[in-house]
Image: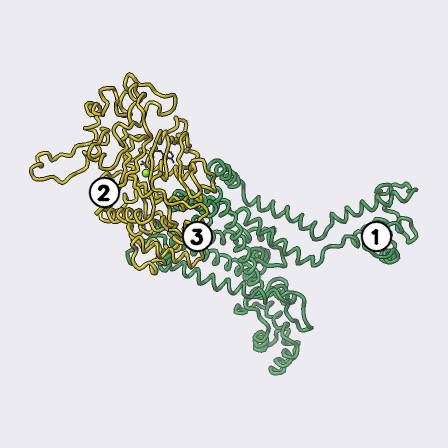
Amino acid sequence: MAEPDPASTPTPNGASRQWRRNVPGLVGVAFLALLVAACLGSLPWTLTAAASAGGASTVPRYNAGDPSAGRLPPAWWPPDAEQSERLVSLVPAEQLQSIADHYGITADDLLHARNQAATAEAIRSAPKPILGTDVLGRSLLVRCLAGGGISLGIGIAAAGISVIIGTLYGAFAGYVGGKTDAVLMRIVDILYGLPYILLVVLIAVASDALIEEFVSRSGARDAWSSRTVAQISSQISSPTPGPSPRLEGIDLDQPAPADDPFTRALAAELSRETHRTEDQAREQLSRHVDATRGDLLAAAALLARPPREGLASARVFLDVCTLLLAIGGVSWLTMARVIRGQVLSLKGQPFVEAARAAGASPSRIFGRHLLPNLLGPIIVYATLTVPQAILQESFLSFLGIGVKPPLPSWGNLAAEGLSELNSFRSNWWLLLFPCLLLAVSLLALNFVGEGLREAFDPKRARR
Amino acid sequence: MTETAVANATPQPPNTQAPILSVQSLAVSFENGRAPRVQAVDGVRMTIYPKQTLAVVGESGCGKSVTALSMLQLIPRPPGRFDRGRIMFRSDRGPVDLLTLGAREIREIRGNEIAMIFQEPMTSLNPVYTIGNQITEAILLHQRVGAAQAREIAIKAMSDVGIPDPERRLKAYPHQFSGGMRQRVMIAMALACQPRLLLADEPTTALDVTIQAQILELITGLKDSRDMAVMLITHDLGVVAENSDVVCVMYAGRVVEYAKVFDLYDAPLHPYTRGLLASIPKMRTKAQTRQHRLVTIREIVDDETQFRQLPGAENGVRPWWPWHKPPADLTPRDEPAGDYDLLEVAPEHWVGVWRTDAVQHRESREPDIGYRVPARA
Ligand SMILES: Nc1ncnc2c1ncn2[C@@H]1O[C@H](COP(=O)(O)OP(=O)(O)O)[C@@H](O)[C@H]1O
Ligand SMILES: [Mg+2]
């Protein structure tokens, strides 16, 4: 190996020279490029609906499957007797018939594997997914691709968030210095001391309640109900006493026929709320025959405060967003420390003093002279934060806090795979492939980050 | 000349007779943990005229940089503090006290009317930008010109400071330049906005001797061709002799001697100055080689008789020296550095003395010498 140049400096040239010698880093970059292209590039395909035989399906491709084709092994793995039987049964009827005719047996013989050659032929023509299928017969490849897109996307975005927060926080603390710096860095120390997983779980759980309220609006409905009941009870003068649950003097367990004063008052309230005529409101309520007053009230509340549109997709989107915030929001601490240290040392550099002497304002010095010099460490730590964030996402999804099914991620795919691992039948592919993808991409990311660190750090490069 | 005079509402012909900057009893101190504050500079006075080079000489740590940095409010505060004094500057908008200007006002002076170059040319340039980028930034900070025009000015400035092939060098990065070339770039940046005063804080200390001479020659030449004043900070008296008009010798935060350059070399009055001059190695003739040993500063300042040679010594005028016990007839003023005075002991020749009875009654001007060495050959 050639003697490293002792004069190598953290200049762009020096960095790229160091970089070219780093074989694991280069392999990592190549692998990641492929993986990211495959996962993110296929998202438009995996997230859109597959056209099924009976017409257009509304289920996205990563979620579409045939339950009878569940738990099939990868195409290149020899199926056992039970799997073979199911594979044969998946062959379209006409094709099955033609194979049976060819071997001179009936389709029923074929289905019961009475002729080995014919069965082998039928299995060959059966639809076989490359990486096998999961419990619900969904292609594992498609789910791994979509899960990869989501895992990598969350990882990269969370790393981006942590880079932004960490850089701004650390750079501000370092640049201002003095007491402000001391206070800001003690806050970081305290956050460091807290178990971060607990923080993430708390953020995720707390935001879950918020999402629930935002999307399905159950709280808003409750509020509407009690407000309405209060309104009505002030109108109805003679409430009948009774042992059943009561609200503001109204017995909610009583049946509510159409001519009941409660029903009429409720219809009036509802019509005011939904801008319809009273008749229309009464008509809507009258669909609930034999209902108690309580049932009627719940129905009216649902009409007055309906859940938001696109409930499922909104929930998925918000879920992913909170996960992103939770991970990004706790992983910026190291970044902030590193950047602060860099700023402190850069601040004392003569070129900063020279810029001040030339009349540059503090903000200009910060943006033009400090930030560009921070680019090296920012890039390195960003690359090292991505695998960390991906791991955290997968970990949380594995525990069931993060990305929730049916949306796949490598973490919840692994969790599903683990639950399918039993002594009766292993279904190993369900666990192996998500874990393999996760492990190899984490390794690749760490190689790349390590390589970048060496490239940007003259002291290490000189070894 | 007349055109600009007409263009200006208040025509100001370059007044080379009035000082451009005068430092009046400047005192700067720094926090020092729980210990008492460090008095970096105390009672410093000096005056600079246009087209003049004032050399500030003294050993490391005597407060030269603090004096220069104070002029641009570049002292970090805290820990630093301006205790006393004024620095009057004749700016384009009339006289101002540089110490009391607001943040925005001083930024308009920095790099524009007063420019500064530093000792470390290797690290005074930002490694991530090209030379051209940094020079044009300095121009765009203070001048309302377009990018193309700024580039023109930058090229002109680079050729002015003797950088060959400036158009191509504009695209080079600092690490592609040698130390001498980088210092030329620093000078080009400093001069791009036509400052009226250049503060050069040991501009050649980090350079080797031949480059040193070239850079100083360059600064002197540029000073003469533009109505610029230069404050040249150095600890090298050899540099001073050839490149300055007036010399200010500092020690321990105070001015100990202030005189025209030839007066100082021919008749140094403060023992410390004599020590400094005696300790410069000189080429000797064969006849002199018997006395081959160098005289050290210590040998001179440790000699009591050296302190009794001032004009007026018979009346008790004694050079100020922090390591001596003050004379018995000291009559200090009630203020910091009140035991000390900068006394004009000979015409246009000031020496830092103890404020004894004899000194108290002598009338003394502020140090102020408008002298310039006649054009050098
Ligand atoms: N930022 C600072 N903090 C504390 N003390 C300082 C600072 N800058 C300068 N000083 C003090 O001021 C004195 C003079 O320093 P300086 O002007 O830099 O000396 P020099 O004459 O070598 O340029 C030093 O002895 C040092 O104790
Ligand atoms: Mg200095």
Tell me the SS state at disc 2: helix
Chain to which mark 3 belongs: B
**Residue highlighted by disc 3:** B140
Distance between the alpha carbons at the discs numbered 1 and 3? 65 Å
* Same chain letter for marks 1 and 2: no
Distance between the alpha carbons at the discs numbered 1 and 2? 97 Å
Query: Residue drawn 56% across and 56% down?
Result: A414
In the image shown, does A308 or B234 lie closer to the viewer? B234
Q: Position of residue A89 (x, y in %)?
A: 64, 72
- The amino acid on which the numbered mark 1 sits, given as a three-letter code, is Arg
Displayed quadrant of residue A449: bottom left
Query: Residue drawn 29% across and 54% down?
Result: B162
**Residue highlighted by disc 1:** A272
Q: Position of residue B151 (x, y in %)?
A: 39, 57
**Residue highlighted by disc 2:** B242
Above or below for A352 versus A40: above
Q: Which chain is yellow?
A: B
Mark 2 vs mark 3, foreground winner is: 2
Q: Colour of chain A?
A: green
Residue A191 appears in the picture as rendered:
yes
Chain to which mark 2 belongs: B
Tell me the SS state at disc 3: helix
- The amino acid on which the numbered mark 2 sits, given as a three-letter code, is Glu
Tell me the SS state at disc 1: helix
Residue count near mark 2 (Cα–Cα under 10 Å), binned few <14, some 14–19, many ≥20: some
